[in-house]
């Protein structure tokens, strides 16, 4: 009796592994077909770069820097650079979302507790956030819709600052926006 129950348990595990491998194979085939379909369009060029540094990491406090980059479209570029120099500084958070074509976004954050968000929908947008706090909170948000938006935010010094820019431009003639706080 023991051998049949052992065989039954082993065959159940085998069936589960079989179905799991079928699902994984299906997902891989789907991604390969999708990648092949996209490779026929020679103008697709996406690039991302993420660099994060911490002098001392205290895993128990969950103080790691976090970067999220999401891009949909052609010829979009995004980069983030985040660092904090001491263990008492909180982590930095950056999120870049781009949907459209030929959009460029950059977030640079030094020291801790900085939040930078760039959200761009449309074409030919440029956005830059540069923050250098002293472990007090800095926050910068850029939200652009339409065409050819150009926004730059720079914050330096002690914290508790927030800047938010929302720009909607469907004519293609938006003025550049530059905000510097020190």
Image: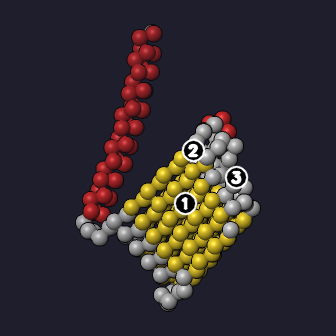
Q: Is residue 97 left or right of residue 166?
A: left
Q: Quadrant of residue 5?
A: top left
Q: Is residue 163 left or right of residue 26?
A: right
User: In 3D space, how far apart are the residues under numbered discs 3 and 1 (Cα atoms)?
Assistant: 15 Å
Q: Which mark is residue 108?
A: 1
SS class, disc 1: strand
SS class, disc 3: loop
User: In 3D space, how far apart are the residues under numbered discs 3 and 2 (Cα atoms)?
Assistant: 13 Å
When the figure is inspected, residue 58 is found, relative to residue 6, above or below; the finding is below
Q: Which mark is residue 54?
A: 2
Q: Is residue 24 left or right of residue 172?
A: left
Query: For the C terminus, which image quadrant?
Result: bottom right
Residue, disc 3: 135
Relative image position of residue 98 (x, y in whole percent)? 48, 68
Residue shown at 54%/82% (left/top)? 176
The mark that comes first in sequence, 1 or 2, is 2
Relative image position of residue 169 (x, y in whole percent)? 54, 85
């Amino acid at each position: 009796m023991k051998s049949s129950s052992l065989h039954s348990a082993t065959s159940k595990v085998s069936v589960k592994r079989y179905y799991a491998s079928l699902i994984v194979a299906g997902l891989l085939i789907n991604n390969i077909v999708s990648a092949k379909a996209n490779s026929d369009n020679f103008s697709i060029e996406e690039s991302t770069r993420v660099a994060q540094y911490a002098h001392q990491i205290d895993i128990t406090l969950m103080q790691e820097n976090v970067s999220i980059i999401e891009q949909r479209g052609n010829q979009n570029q995004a980069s983030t650079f985040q660092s904090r120099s001491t263990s008492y500084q909180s982590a930095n958070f950056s999120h870049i979302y781009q949907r459209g074509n030929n959009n460029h976004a950059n977030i640079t954050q030094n020291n801790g507790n900085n939040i930078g968000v760039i959200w761009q929908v449309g074409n030919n947008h440029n956005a830059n956030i540069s923050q250098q706090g002293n472990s007090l909170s800095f926050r910068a948000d850029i939200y652009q819709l339409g065409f050819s938006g150009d926004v730059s935010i720079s914050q330096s010094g002690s914290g508790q600052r927030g800047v938010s820019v929302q720009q909607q431009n469907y004519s293609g003639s938006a003025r550049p926006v530059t905000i510097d706080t020190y």
